[in-house]
Amino acid sequence: MSLYLRQIGVIVWKDLLLELRTRERVAAMGAFAVLAGVLFNFSTDRSLVRPQDMAAGLIWMTIVFDGLLGVGRTFHLEAEDGALQGLLMSPAPKDAIFLGKALSNFVLLYAVALLVLAVFMLFFGLGIGSSPAAVLLSLGLGALGFVALGTLFAAVSSGTRMGETVLPILVFPLLVPMVIYGAGATGRLLAGRPVAEVAGNLRMLGAFALVALAAGAALFRFVVED
Amino acid sequence: MILATESPRPAAATAAVVDARGLVREYGAVVAVDGIDLTLAEGEFLTVFGPNGAGKTSLLKMLGGAMRPTRGTVAIGGVPLDFSNGEWRRSVGMLSHQGFLYQRLTAEENLRFYGRLFGLGDLEARIRARLERVGLADRARHAVHQLSHGMKQRLALARALLHDPQLVLLDEPYTGLDPAAASVLRQVLQELRSDRRTVVMVTHNLTEGLALATRVAIQVGGRLGWEGAREDVEPDGFERHYHEVVEGRA
C-alpha cells in the first residue's frame, strides 16, 4: 500500500478511535436521529398524506441536519492542543488529510443514515422496498457527497468566530442537488419501484459525490494553510 | 563589558540547513516580523530572546513552514519551501506552545499516529526508544489528558523528534516544566547539539537559552536587534545587554 493511502488510513483510524473513546458526535447524532423520527411521527397527519409519500424527504432532511451536527464538529477533534497544526506540519499531502477526515466522517454519517432509515421505517411503518441494496447505495452516495462538502466547509467555519452558525449557511445551498436526487431515489425505492427507474438519480448522486470529493481535496489546502 | 569579543559570526562551512531571506509577516496592519535574514548551518544552535510581541513565534513558524511569510523566502537544505509538496517537512521538528497531541489518545498512540503520517520504518522500536528517552516509558498507555503538564511537554518533545529532523524548532520549551522535566529537556537538547542537529530555540529563560547556544539573537519589534556568537556573550552581563537592546539603548 502506498504511503499516501496509509496516511489517509491513519487519519481515519485516529478519528474513529477518538470517536469510539469520546462518543461525542455519535451520541448526539444518534439521539437526534431518534428524536427527529419521533417528532416527525407526531407532526404528520396520516389521514391526509401517506407516510411513503413524505418519508424519503424527511429521511434526507434528517440526515442533512444530523450530518451538520456531526461533521460540523470534525475539526473540534483537532482543536485541542493545536493538533491540527501538528497534522499540517506532517509530510502528509493536504488532500490526503482532507480525504482521511472525509472518510472518517463518512463512516460516522453512513452509520447514522442507516439508523435514520431504521427509525423512519419503524415510526412510519415503511418497508425497505424491492431493492434494499439500492436504498443503501442511495444513502451511501448521498452521505459521501455530504461529507465531502461538509468536511471542507467545516474547515472553513472552524476558523470563524460563529463557525457552527455559519456552516449551514455555507453548505445548504450546495446540497440542493444531492437532496433532490437522493430523496427522489430513496422515495421511489421505498415505494417498491424498480431500480432501473432511479438509475439516473443514482448516477447523479455518484457524480455529485465525486465532484464534491475532488473539489474538497483540491481546495482544502487553501482553507487550512496559514 | 557585556560582549567578550566581537568575533565574526561562524562561517557556514557546510550547506545551510535553513536560509531565510527578507522574512516579513504581517497581520493586517501589524508587522510581526520585519525583514529578517537568517542562515544556519548544520550543528548551529541559535537561541532567540525577545520581549512578548517581538515576533519570535512568527519567525519560528515561518522557518518551520507552519506559516507562510507575507514576503521573503525560506529554504531548507538549499531547497525553497514548496507548500504544495510537504516532503521537506521530514527535515523539520517543531515543539510549540501547544504540544500537537490528541488528549484522548495514549502517549504511544499519539507517537504511532505521527510516525505513520511520516511513514517511519521500525516504528514501534522508535516509539519505545523515544518514550524511554523522555522518561515516559511507564506512561506509554496513559491517555494524554491524564498526564501532567511536564509529562505532556516531554511527550511533545518526543513527538517533535520522532522522525529525527535535521532542523529542530523550539518555542519556549522550558515554560511550566518542573526541575525533572527541565533536566530531561536539557539532556535531549545537549544530545541534539552533539548530534550536529540545527536548533532554533525561542525562550525568555536567559540561563537555559545561553547554556547550549552557539549563536544568540535578541528580537525586538520584528527585527533581530542584536545577533552574535555565543562566545561573544558574557553570561553575567547579558541580562543588562538584553534590556539595553530591547529598550533601544544598545
Image (tube, rainbow, N blue to C red):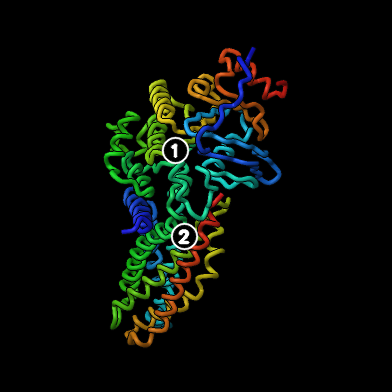
Q: Is B218 above or below relative to B93?
A: above
Task: Give the chain letter at badge 2.
Answer: A
Q: Residue at x 49, y 32 (%)?
A: B199
Which residue is the site of mark 1?
B166
Q: Position of residue A185 (x, y in %)?
A: 39, 80
The answer to whether residue A34 shows anywhere in this view is: no
Find numbered disc 1 in the image and state the secondary structure of the residue it sits on: loop
| Residue occupying the point 44% across, 26% down | B177
Q: CA distance from mark 1 to mark 2?
A: 34 Å
B133 lies above or below A172? above
Instruction: Give residue B201's position: percent from left, percent from top.
Output: 51, 30
Crowd tier of the residue under label 1, counting other residues whose Cα lies within 10 Å: few below 14, some 14–19, many 20 or above: many
Chain designation of label 1: B
Nearest the eye: A22 or A159: A159
Q: Which mark is residue A116?
A: none
Q: Residue A151: which disc?
A: 2
* Callout count: 2
Q: Amino acid at mark 2?
A: Thr
Q: Nearer the viewer, residue A155 or A38?
A: A155
Specify the farthest residue to the front.
B13
Disc 1 vs disc 2: which is toward the camera?
Answer: 1
Question: Quarter-wise, where is residue A37 in the image?
Answer: bottom left
Residue A1 at x, y percent in the picture: 31, 59
Could you tell me if the residues under marks 1 and 2 are in contact, i.e. CB atoms within 8 Å? Answer: no
Q: Secondary structure at mark 2?
A: helix
Residue A73: x and y, percent?
45, 54
Q: Residue at x 30, y 81 (%)?
A: A129
Whether residue A180 is visible, yes or no, is: yes
* A53 lies above or below A64: below
Q: Amino acid at mark 1?
A: Gln
Q: Residues within 10 Å of mark 2 (few under 14, many from 20)?
A: many
